[in-house]
């Protein structure tokens, strides 16, 4: 989707997502700070950027299942933990639609064909999320990401956005 359209959609939706972010921040405050989780992820061309998300786990070590908070569980189930990524979109580090940025440690494991997922900006949502989100393997995610890149168009991006909203409402 053209960057101008993407920016228009994000800015036009700012009152709604800004209010949602404020409410999530208020819900997280009793759990302490920081409210945001920051992590380096590969972006366009594989160059690292810092992804922003709401914190859903207690600090420390141990299994994620033991560290996730009650509020964090709700945020993840509703994808509200990803609202701060809209700031990444405004900064130009992410797109609304594109391959989800995986972890930096996976970069060395990609085949030359799989590296093409970094030919576009990573997205908040994408074709792989419509097809199973966390229920599919990393290899399946990469396959869907490459299919997305091959089919990429404004109409396809708008379809993915629509299906994302529909998918979230069904959870």
Image (spheres, rainbow, N blue to C red):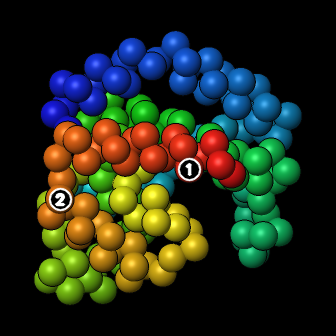
In which quarter of the view is residue 58 placed? bottom right
Task: Give residue 92's position: percent from left, percent from top.
Answer: 25, 36
Q: Compared to 110, does 161 lie above or below?
A: above
Label 1 secondary element: helix
Q: Residue at x 19, y 32 (%)?
A: 3
Q: Residue at x 40, y 41 (%)?
A: 161
User: Which residue is denoted by mark 1 in the rendering?
Assistant: 167
Q: Which mark is residue 151?
A: 2
- Quarter of the image with the N terminus is top left
Tally of numbered discs: 2
Q: Residue at x 76, y 53 (%)?
A: 73
CA distance separating discs 2 and 1: 21 Å
Task: Give residue 167's position: percent from left, percent from top.
Answer: 56, 50
Task: Give residue 171's position: percent from left, percent from top.
Answer: 68, 51
Residue 130 in view in this figure: yes
Q: Compared to 98, does 111 lie above or below?
A: below
- Tell me if mark 2 has few (under 14), some (14-19) or many (20+) residues whose alpha carbon lies within 10 angstroms of its own: few
């Amino acid at each position: 989707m053209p960057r101008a359209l993407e920016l228009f959609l994000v800015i036009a939706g700012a009152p709604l997502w800004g209010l949602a972010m404020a409410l999530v921040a208020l819900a997280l405050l009793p759990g302490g700070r920081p409210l945001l989780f920051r992590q380096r992820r590969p972006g366009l061309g594989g160059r690292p950027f810092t992804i922003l998300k709401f914190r859903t786990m207690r600090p420390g070590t141990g299994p994620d299942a033991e560290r996730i908070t009650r509020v964090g569980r709700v945020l993840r189930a509703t994808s509200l933990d990803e609202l701060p990524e809209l700031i990444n979109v405004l900064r130009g580090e992410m797109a609304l639609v594109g391959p989800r940025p995986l972890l930096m440690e996976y970069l060395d494991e990609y085949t030359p064909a799989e590296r093409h997922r970094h030919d576009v900006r990573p997205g908040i949502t994408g074709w792989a999320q419509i097809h199973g989100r966390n229920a599919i393997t990393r290899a399946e995610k990469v396959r869907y990401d490459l299919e997305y890149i091959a089919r990429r168009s404004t109409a396809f991006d708008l379809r993915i956005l629509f299906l994302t909203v529909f998918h979230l409402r069904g959870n």
